[in-house]
Image (cartoon, helix red, strand yellow):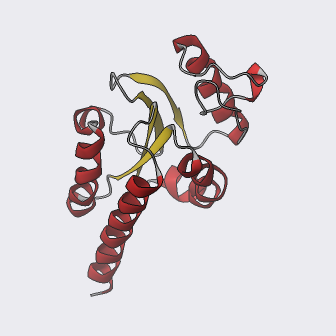
Amino acid sequence: MVSTIKKFGIIVFITVMGALNVSAQSENSKVIVLLNKASWCSVCQANDSRVKKDLMPILMQDKDVQLVVNDISNKDTKAASKPMLDKTGIFSFAKKNTGAGMLYFIDAKTKKLISSVSISKSNEEIHEGCTRKLYQKGTCQSTAKKDTCVIKVVNLECKKL
């Protein structure tokens, strides 16, 4: 009984997050950030509060970045995540990239991988890895200091995690 209620709660949470994500972020995003998470993933559990506190608010406020949370815990949560994956055009990508506890930075136009990093890494390591890849791909061209860019893109002031 409790397990069924928990599953239902997770599905409702994913659906609400997806709806908020769509309304809060632009359809003209330049980068899609796919967060794969799972209830059975020890890395996800260990880093959940840090990701929610430090990373998600930045991503959700950036109009050029679209955050998509993909819960791969079980069949029901995968099904609940699918509509958002379809809407952003990354269902095929997500099906091939199933690492739990991973952030995938995807070019919104080409749907190709820019960078990926485990959420087990420190905020600084996530920042460093993503910054380097975004600059190499030409996705991030901030007027701010090069070393402060993390996810923000083209002509925007960059934020550090």
Q: Nearer the viewer, residue 15 or 155?
A: 155
Drawn side of residue 127 relative to residue 85, left or right: right
Q: Position of residue 161 (x, y in %)?
A: 70, 42
Given residues 27 and 58, the one toward you in this image is: 27
Q: Which sits in the foreground, 78 or 106?
A: 106
Q: Is residue 44 above or below residue 85?
A: below
**Residue under the image location 56 percent in, 58 percent down:** 48
Residue 95 position, x and y percent, is 24, 37
Q: Residue at x 36, y 70 (%)?
A: 10
x then y, percent, for residue 115: 49, 25
Check the picture and name the quadrant holding the N terminus: bottom left
Which residue is more in the foreground, 22 or 92? Answer: 22
Above or below residue 3? Residue 108 is above
Residue 155 position within the rendered picture, expressed as x and y whole percent measured from the top left:
64, 25
Q: Is residue 73 left or right of residue 79?
A: right
Viewed as shown, does residue 16 lie left or right of 125? Answer: left
> Is residue 66 among what the camera can see?
yes
The quarter of the picture where residue 49 lies is bottom right
Q: In the rendered view, would you say 129 is above or below 122?
A: above
Q: Residue at x 68, y 27 (%)?
A: 128
Say if residue 39 shows up in the picture.
Answer: no
Which residue appears at 36% of the width and 22% of the height? 112
* 130 versus 24 height, above or below: above
